[in-house]
């Protein structure tokens, strides 16, 4: 069982897609998504199952056998590797390992130098849907590369059939990075892109719309030059951002949102972002 450090090996050189493996159906859904992303970007797929050292000394004084946890992790990785091969990757493109440490901390550290991190989100019904996994929330702040969060329940089938990506824009400082990533992703997929801005202001809607469109056009102008083949549409709407973005997620293969880098230690994921992650009908990409 290795520690949570990036392994420098030929297998992990070049473009790399990192996927968290936990043995669940959501984890396998993340693996399948990551495998398609790796195939599209000609990247290595890095499958990681993290064993939290905190659980090795369990409740009531029970001490878990490290070898049993290692075996369980290897079994989960075998299923993940099989799913990746079924998705069309060559065996040489897939690297897997079991790592000792908290899952969020391990994946955050290994995400440094990765091109994409993919993790599953367990989606349930009722009030439970208000609470998304702590690993996903922690990684939204801590990941060093773009993060895709995907749910087996919300998106059980293969994504990509709608050939449509959307990106939420608020015209703040992090939006150019978010928009640039979304354009590059749309170009790689040959998909069209909807740039969406949601305003809560109901009065003077026409003036608000015009200001928002001008701001978006300014962001888009230099990016269109580097991505001239992408069909881009701008959509300005009014209402609750959560409702609008969740509704939009049902019409696309991927919803891209910008996350500001935290200035202080701790979790800084806002209420809108948490709600969208909990209820999105498509995979959600979080880009800093």
Image (cartoon, helix red, strand yellow):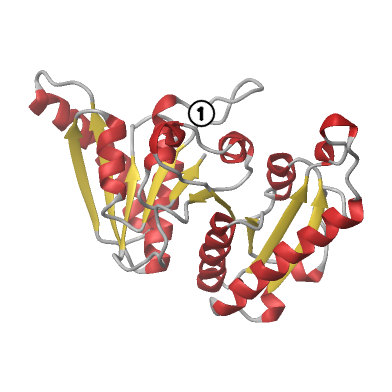
> Residue 247 or 168: which is nearer the viewer?
247
The local secondary structure at tag 1 comes to loop
> Residue 140 or 178: which is nearer the viewer?
140
x and y percentages locating residue 62 in the rendered image: 88, 37
Q: How many marks?
A: 1
Specify whether residue 241 is in view: yes
Pointer 1: what residue? Answer: 269
x and y percentages locating residue 261 in the rendered image: 56, 31
Specify whether residue 13 is in view: no
Q: In this picture, is 118 found above or below 58?
A: below
x and y percentages locating residue 230 in the rendered image: 30, 62
Q: Residue sitting at 46 percent across and 26 percent down?
A: 270
Q: Residue sitting at 86 percent across and 56 percent down?
A: 68
Relative to 277, 54 lies left or right: right
x and y percentages locating residue 96 in the rendered image: 74, 65
Q: Residue furthest front?
A: 60
Among the 4 quarters of the image, the one containing residue 34 = bottom right
Q: Quadrant of the N terminus?
A: bottom right
Relative to 41, 21 lies left or right: right
Relative to 216, 143 lies left or right: right
Relative to 141, 251 lies left or right: left
**Mark 1: few/some/many CA within 10 Å (<14, 14-19, 20+):** some
Q: Residue sitting at 65 percent across and 55 percent down?
A: 114
Q: Residue sitting at 42 percent across and 59 percent down?
A: 185
Q: In this picture, is 94 found above or below 252?
A: below
Q: In this picture, is 180 found above or below 72?
A: above
> Residue 203 or 208: which is nearer the viewer?
203
């Amino acid at each position: 069982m290795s520690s949570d450090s990036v392994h420098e090996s030929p297998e992990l050189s070049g473009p790399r897609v990192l996927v968290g493996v936990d043995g669940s159906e959501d984890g396998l859904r993340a693996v399948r998504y990551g495998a398609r992303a790796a195939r599209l970007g000609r990247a290595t797929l890095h499958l990681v199952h993290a064993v939290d050292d905190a659980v090795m000394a369990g409740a009531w004084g029970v001490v878990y056998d490290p070898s049993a946890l290692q075996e369980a992790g290897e079994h989960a990785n075998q299923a993940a590797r099989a799913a990746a091969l079924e998705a069309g990757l060559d065996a040489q493109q897939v690297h897997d390992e079991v790592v000792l440490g908290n899952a969020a901390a391990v994946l955050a550290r290994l995400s440094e130098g990765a091109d994409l991190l993919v993790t599953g989100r367990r989606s349930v019904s009722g009030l439970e849907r208000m609470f998304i996994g702590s690993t996903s929330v922690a990684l939204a702040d801590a990941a060093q590369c773009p993060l895709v969060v995907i749910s087996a329940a919300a998106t059980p089938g293969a994504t990509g059939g709608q050939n449509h990506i959307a990106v939420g824009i608020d015209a703040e400082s992090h939006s150019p990075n978010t928009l640039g990533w979304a354009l590059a992703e749309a170009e790689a997929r040959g998909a069209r892109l909807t740039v969406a801005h949601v305003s809560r202001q109901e009065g003077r809607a026409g003036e608000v719309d015009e200001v928002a469109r001008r701001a978006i056009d300014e962001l888009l102008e230099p990016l269109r030059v580097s991505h001239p083949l992408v069909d881009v549409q701008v959509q300005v709407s009014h209402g609750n951002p959560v409702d609008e973005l969740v509704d939009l997620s049902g019409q696309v293969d991927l919803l891209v949102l910008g996350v500001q880098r935290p200035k202080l230690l701790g979790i800084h994921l806002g209420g809108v972002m948490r709600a969208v992650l909990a209820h999105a009908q498509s995979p959600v990409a979080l880009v800093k």
